[in-house]
Image (spheres, rainbow, N blue to C red):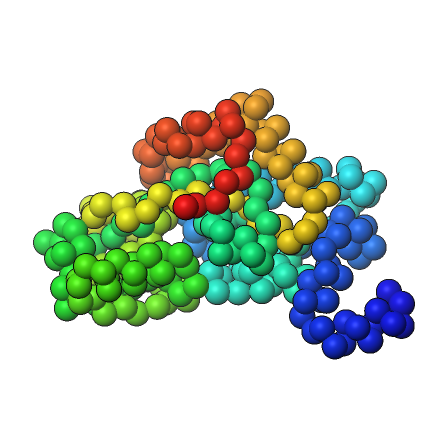
């Protein structure tokens, strides 16, 4: 970077910082390491089991890291991991702290202004986790009640919009992560936890008493999940898409899906029993990175 460009960067601030990190493969090659993001409670995608990172997108991230090692010619490239939340995952990607985020992040056009997305790897919709004893079956049963929705998620935007349009009179609390939202329901500090249905099934399956809870309500919106990469970095996006697309074409992704959605998973060794959706089956063929409507 020249002295002139340094002065320009100082004037432009964060926009220039993002540009400086845009070439991920060069950054990784120069630094000697890549930093991957993980979530602490996005079951079964990316979460902690006895302090160990596990999940479908953790394995996808590891496969991408292996491809990066080959691309930069460094088989011993160090792989670092950084925990992220719904609120800080985009800032940490754009400022260069992390280089890739594969978890439970919705691919939509709003986020697409700040980051780019890889091929969609899951489709989900916003529903409600409640205690069976609550009698709550749908959104209209929540009038005047408190509902937890994780801060920084599209679910919060969707539910706030629907709440205003349909006069549900819901009071929202915004925990920092999904496990905290579930705790609010367990402790009767919230009547429901609104989130992507797959994450709700994951939390419920790993609860001490899974039979005390259920997932209810119509899906407010069907949304795709995808890995995030920095904006305007076509070379790295091509690599990420190549890995994910290759896994989908070879059948490796379908095997991973079966492992994490149909078989017993830690920590409770309980299966989610969620067959692959028609939307995902279609995307395995089309390899689309199209955002949510």
Percent coordinates x, y for residue 49 in the rendering? 46, 50
| Residue displayed at 80% across by 43% down | 72
Give the quarter of the figure containing the N terminus: bottom right
Depicted 50 relative to depicted 8: above or below: above
Q: How many marks?
A: 0
Residue positioned most to the top:
250
Q: Write down the quadrant of residue 265 in the picture.
A: top left
| Residue displayed at 75% across by 52% down | 23
Percent coordinates x, y for residue 278 in the rendering? 37, 29
Task: Say whether residue 29 is left or right of residue 45.
Answer: right
Percent coordinates x, y for residue 113 in the rendering? 56, 56
Percent coordinates x, y for residue 99 in the rendering? 66, 54
In front of the other: 153 or 50: 153
Task: Say whether residue 206 is left or right of residue 116.
Answer: left
The answer to whether residue 257 of the structure is visible from this angle is: yes
The answer to whether residue 97 of the structure is visible from this angle is: no
Depicted 79 relative to depicted 11: above or below: above
In front of the other: 159 or 209: 159
In front of the other: 256 or 224: 224
| Residue displayed at 77% across by 55% down | 27
| Residue displayed at 33% across by 57% down | 158
In front of the other: 163 or 152: 163
Depicted 193 relative to depicted 61: above or below: below
Task: Say whether residue 141 is left or right of residue 249.
Answer: left
Task: Say whether residue 42 is left or right of residue 125.
Answer: right
């Amino acid at each position: 970077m020249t002295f002139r460009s340094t002065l320009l960067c100082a004037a432009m601030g964060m926009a220039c910082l993002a540009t400086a990190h845009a070439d991920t493969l060069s950054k990784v090659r120069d630094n000697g390491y890549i930093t991957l993001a993980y979530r602490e409670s996005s079951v079964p995608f990316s979460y902690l089991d006895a302090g160990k990172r596990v999940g479908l997108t953790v394995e996808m991230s590891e496969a991408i890291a292996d491809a990066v090692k080959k691309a930069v010619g460094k088989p011993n490239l160090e792989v670092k991991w950084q925990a992220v939340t719904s609120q800080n995952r985009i800032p940490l990607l754009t400022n260069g702290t992390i280089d890739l985020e594969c978890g439970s992040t919705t691919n939509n056009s709003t986020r697409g202004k700040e980051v780019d997305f890889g091929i969609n790897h899951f489709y989900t919709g916003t529903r409600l986790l409640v205690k069976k004893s609550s009698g709550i079956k749908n959104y209209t049963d929540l009038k005047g009640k408190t509902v937890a929705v994780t801060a920084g998620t599209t679910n919060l935007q969707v539910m706030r919009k629907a709440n205003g349009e349909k006069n549900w009179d819901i009071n929202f609390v915004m925990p920092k992560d999904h496990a905290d939202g579930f705790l609010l329901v367990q402790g009767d500090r919230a009547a429901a936890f609104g989130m992507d249905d797959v994450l709700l099934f994951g939390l419920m399956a790993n609860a001490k008493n899974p039979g005390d809870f259920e997932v209810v309500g119509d899906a407010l919106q069907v949304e795709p999940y995808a890995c995030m990469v920095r904006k305007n970095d076509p070379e790295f996006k091509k690599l990420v898409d190549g890995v994910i697309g290759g896994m989908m074409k070879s059948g490796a992704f379908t095997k991973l899906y079966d492992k994490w959605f149909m078989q017993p998973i830690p920590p409770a060794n309980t299966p989610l029993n969620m067959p692959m959706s028609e939307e995902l089956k279609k995307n395995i063929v089309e390899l689309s990175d199209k955002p949510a409507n």
